Image (cartoon, rainbow, N blue to C red):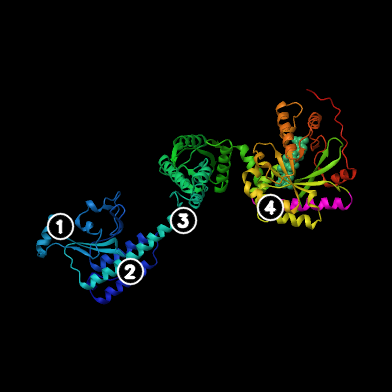
Amino acid sequence: MTTPSETGTADSLENLVTHVATQLMAVDAATSPGVSQQVLGQLSSSFGVDVCFLRYNDHSIRATRLIAEWPPHERDPDPLELIYFTDADPVFAAAEHAKEPVFFRPDPIPEDEYQRLVEEGTGMALTSMASVPLLSGDTTTGCIGFIKFGIKDWTPEELNALKAIASLFAQVQARVVAEDQLRYLAEHDDLTGLHNRRALLAHLDERLRVGQQGPVSVLFLDLDRLKAINDYLGHHAGDWFIQAFAQRLREETGDGDVIARLGGDEFVIVPAGSVDADAAEALAHRLQDALRDRVTIGGETLTRTVSAGVALGVPGRDTTSDLLRRADQAVLNAKNAGGNKIAVFTDEMSLRSEFRNDIELHLQNVIDTGSLILHYLPEVDMRTGEILATEALVRWQHPTRGLLLPDSFIHVAESINLAGELGRWVMRTACEEFSRWQASGIAKDAVIRINVSPVQLVADGFVQSVADTIAEFGLDGKSVCLEITESVVVQDIETTRITLAGLKEVGVRIAIDDFGTGYSVLTHLKSLPVDTLKIDKGFVLELGTNPEDLAIVRAIIALAEAFNLELVAEGVELPSAAMTLLQHGCHRAQGFLLSRPIPSDAMAELFAKGVIPVDFSVPIRN
Ligand code: C2E
Ligand code: CA
Ligand code: CA
């Protein structure tokens, strides 16, 4: 250890600087205060001073903040920790922009006079001080300070050493600031400055550790109608809307609450401390009231509403992803209920999401394992019973849940990007079986109808893959009909138009499925290359008893005639419905009255017979 008497020699000073450099080199944000304090201790003994300190400037609030000092002090609160330059004494005030060391030293007085002053307790008046700036380019970023209770003169060599040491401290500071900035960026959302997903996950991981206080509640907020704002008023308006919302969230939440933006219009709040379901729901209501607001963007006044989902997690039992999935599920329910609603995750939702997870898990390799099959629903001329077509309907032989109908897994497949693969399997399998039937001399003039998911229809290469498949199995395009639902056609009319034109060139037929369900495709009917309309079963099931349904069905029949389209009724369960359809001129139909969906062998047998006997002699009521 260097002692004060050794200071001043060029060698010992050089050693000191090297020693300080070695220690500061390895410092990071976390270890900086501790190591700095240690170094200050060495400096104080090397230079023979009583106090050393390290301070950083915060120019944004015009203040200097204590980072480390020697000897260590426990003052709580420390009045010297943050000093504003405007009310600082001259030594500190000078530290704001100083580029060179600043010295304060009392006028020299004889030693015995000094002793007397110290004994009187006024020795502090004789304090000498040096403040050496930390510099980063043109900015004074802080200082190291040296205080001697008495007189201290600095030699030019000592001064050089001080500057070298100050520059070492400045480097550490720059590194720590950069590190803090990086951490900030890694944990915060650019647009709003709120926490991001990563920070939220880390926070929840911590809150859900075994032994932590619970329950931990999570509020999942979803801004209603943000998409519409982006679409109609532009992304700037959307960003502004989100920022204003984030600001309001900050104002409405408590100090320890964590607010995160997961991207898009999704926000999550994790209240500090344990909060039970009732309290969390109450908080959600309070927030929803406070966040509902009228906002003016580009001259349009919009009402900002938010949907909220609430879920609770138990430390040691639930994982972060469990908890977020539940909250997500709850907010989805709130949105589906029309928005501007609050939903708390329930056991029923839990069952449903379990089912969904299970489906998702097993669906991944369902195609490889051969557990998909097709059933066929015959389509019949109700006047004669002749089988005109058959619709391929996919089923899944699930390992534990039995034979699943498409409604329970098609949506899941779409959400995990499996719709394309599944659709190609259906297309290939239906074409293969149908061509096999035709090769054996049955179903010669029949049509195979294949359902196409919305996702397939807009995917690249769809038309080509249809062309390849019918070519591979040697089918005539006219014997293959693709069914698309009405809603899809209207949602993205331009893409649909291009795809349908491509399919027409391939030569296949096109049917609009579930026709009449409300997304009126009427305005486009004339200009789209459509061959067939399938009346949605919702209008057919009660036909013969429900006059409103009849009015709609008659309108659809008239429309089909006007546009010269083939018309098929689905969902014929009752003889009265069959009779009504026949009376009004619709004779093609499918439905449980005629046949249930059947396995492919049974379908082949039916085709071999060619007809399903029809007998609607049951009296028609009303
Ligand atoms: P969809 O295209 O409207 O198919 C007709 C659905 O109505 C079938 O249900 C069929 O079993 C049912 N159905 C037929 N007649 C009657 C009846 O008289 N009464 C009643 N209540 N229902 C009847 P399924 O097989 O459960 O299919 C449901 C939906 O799943 C289909 O509706 C279709 O949109 C979709 N789907 C089926 N197979 C596929 C496929 O391979 N790919 C795609 N993307 N979707 C498919
Ligand atoms: Ca269909
Ligand atoms: Ca349908």
Left or right relative to 251: residue 502: right
Question: Percent x, y for residue 86?
Answer: 23, 52
Nearer-N-terminus badge (2/4): 2
Between 546 and 58, the one nearer to me in the picture: 546
Whether residue 157 is situated above or below residue 206 in the rendered picture: below
Q: For residue 420, which numbered disc appears in the image?
A: 4
Q: Dot 1 surroundings within 10 Å: few (below 14), some, or many (20 or more)?
A: few
- Please tell me in which quarter of the rendered image ligand 2 is found: top right
**Mark 4 or mark 1, whichever is nearer to me:** 4
Which stretch appears magenta?
A: 416-441
Relative horizontal placement of residue 480, taking residue 524 as reference (left or right) = right
* N-term mark: 1 or 2: 2
Tell me the CA gap for discs 3 and 4.
35 Å
Q: Residues under labels 3 and 2: Cα distance? A: 31 Å
Q: Secondary structure at mark 1?
A: helix
Mark 3 residue element: helix
Residue mark closest to the camera, 3 vs 4: 4
Q: Is residue 465 visible?
A: yes
Amino acid type, residue under disc 2 in the picture: Val
Question: Is 52 in front, or is 237?
Answer: 237
